[in-house]
């Protein structure tokens, strides 16, 4: 059995990655502290509860499974929280990742796939965000992810650790078979909050800011389907296993949608009204984040097939109505 250690494998993206890994013939070992993840989402391999800051526990898990690679998803990922509690982001996302990377190197596991973010780029006026765009994060979330990218670079120079770094744009959608789906505790993301509001499970959605310099005044994001995103991770793992060098890839579609456009699409997919009100900007939000690169398609052979707004919202809606989802 070829084990892959998947930190955060009980979370939204991690659980979808485990399904993709299993389908590709690997055995995902989930390492998760269950603070934001759900044990019910661990369905595709063994589960080991633990925290990234617990080095002894990490060493134990590396020794038990001898994974050939790490996929590192576990992180705090809320922009608003990162603005008000930056210390948690530095301690968990940077301190915890450093611990994991050190444990991985100590165990001789030298292939590492890291989930980074377009939030590392920050605000760039009318500039295409490709992988060479200068990283100027606006919040501690983006800053903490950029710091881990730097750690990986230093550990490659010192110990030969090879990494594939994926800078995600906005991940949405769910497994079309609804075995796993999107959930966060607390939920802060646009699509699930909107679907909850449609179902009357939450208050109306608040649109964060209508005075941005965009055609309709709301923020623009590049949405990518979680299944396409995790497919790229399997390709990234194979890239490393083929002995190719460390590489950074954006994962986005190159097309941006405003918050109002997402609301309109949700209305048409669900055939229901979206209750929403207009509110002030959320601190730390960039005006526009759209990937300007096709590097993942050209070099990894990534071909996203579900990343249209329509399919992403349909899959998310099906998951919401599957009976597995709890808001
Ligand atoms: N957003 C919003 N209301 C919400 C949550 C999000 O208007 O209740 C907006 C947010 O300002 C951003 C977009 O939706 O422009 C996507 O936000 P999300 O939190 O889903 O992802 P992020 O871009 O922060 O990674």
Image (cartoon, rainbow, N blue to C red):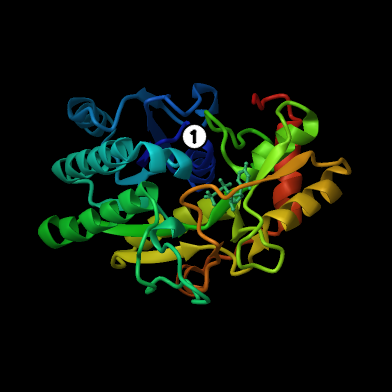
Quick check: 205 above or below 165?
above
Is residue 266 toward the left or the right of residue 22 in the image? right
At a point 59% along the width and 42% down the height, the residue shown is 189
Q: Which residue does the image show at 47% across and 41% down from the upper left?
A: 80
Residue 309 visible to an observer of this rendering: yes
Instruction: Judge by depth and name the residue closer to the eye, 309 or 157.
Output: 309
Quadrant in the picture for the C terminus: top right
Residue receiving disc 1? 11
The spot of residue 49 in percent (x, y) is 36, 23
Instruction: Name the residue located 50 percent from the left edge and 41 percent from the top edge.
Output: 22
Q: Nearer the viewer, residue 68 or 183?
A: 183
Q: Position of residue 258 (x, y in %)?
A: 67, 59
In the image, residue 82 sits, relative to residue 164, either above or below, namely above
Q: Specify whether 262 is left or right of 20.
A: right
Q: Measured from the top left, where is residue 191 in percent x and y?
A: 66, 44
* Horizontal and vertical percent position of residue 279: 65, 45
- Counting the numbered discs, the total is 1
Does residue 11 sit above or below 163 in this rendering? above
Residue found farthest to the right? 271
Which quarter of the picture shows residue 241?
bottom left
| Element class at badge 1 | loop
In depth, the one of 62 and 98 nearer the eye is 98
Q: For residue 74, say whether it is visible.
A: no
Quadrant placement of the N terminus:
top left
The answer to whether 302 appears left or right of 93 in the picture is right
Residue closer to the observer: 47 or 143 = 143
């Amino acid at each position: 059995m070829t084990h892959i250690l998947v930190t955060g494998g009980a979370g939204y993206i991690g659980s979808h990655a485990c399904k993709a890994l299993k389908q590709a013939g690997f055995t995902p070992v989930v390492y998760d502290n269950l603070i934001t993840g759900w044990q019910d989402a661990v369905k595709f391999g063994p589960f080991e509860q633990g925290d990234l800051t617990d080095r002894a526990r990490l060493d134990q898990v590396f020794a038990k499974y001898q994974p050939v690679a790490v996929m590192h998803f576990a992180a705090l990922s809320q922009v608003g929280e990162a603005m008000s509690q930056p210390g948690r982001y530095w301690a968990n996302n940077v301190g915890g990742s450093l611990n994991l990377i050190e444990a991985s190197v100590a165990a001789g596991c030298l292939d590492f796939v890291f989930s980074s973010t377009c939030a590392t780029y920050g605000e760039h006026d009318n500039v295409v965000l490709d992988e060479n765009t200068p990283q100027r994060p606006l919040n501690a979330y983006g800053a903490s992810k950029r710091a881990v990218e730097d750690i990986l670079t230093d550990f490659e120079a010192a110990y030969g650790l090879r990494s594939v770094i994926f800078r995600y744009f906005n991940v949405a959608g769910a497994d079309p078979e609804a075995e796993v789906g999107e959930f966060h505790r607390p939920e802060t993301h646009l699509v699930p909050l909107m679907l909850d509001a449609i179902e009357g499970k939450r208050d109306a959605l608040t649109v964060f800011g209508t005075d941005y310099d965009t055609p309709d005044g709301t923020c623009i994001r590049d949405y990518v389907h979680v299944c396409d995103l995790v497919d790229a991770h399997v390709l990234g793992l194979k890239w490393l296993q083929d002995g190719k060098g460390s590489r950074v890839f954006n994962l986005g579609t190159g097309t941006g949608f405003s918050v109002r456009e997402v609301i309109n699409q949700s209305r048409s997919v669900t055939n229901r009204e979206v209750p929403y009100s207009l509110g002030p900007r959320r601190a730390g939000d960039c005006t526009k984040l759209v990937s300007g690169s096709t590097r993942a398609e050209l070099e990894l052979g990534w071909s996203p097939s579900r990343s249209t707004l329509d399919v992403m919202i349909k899959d998310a809606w099906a998951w919401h109505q599957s009976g597995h989802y709890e808001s």
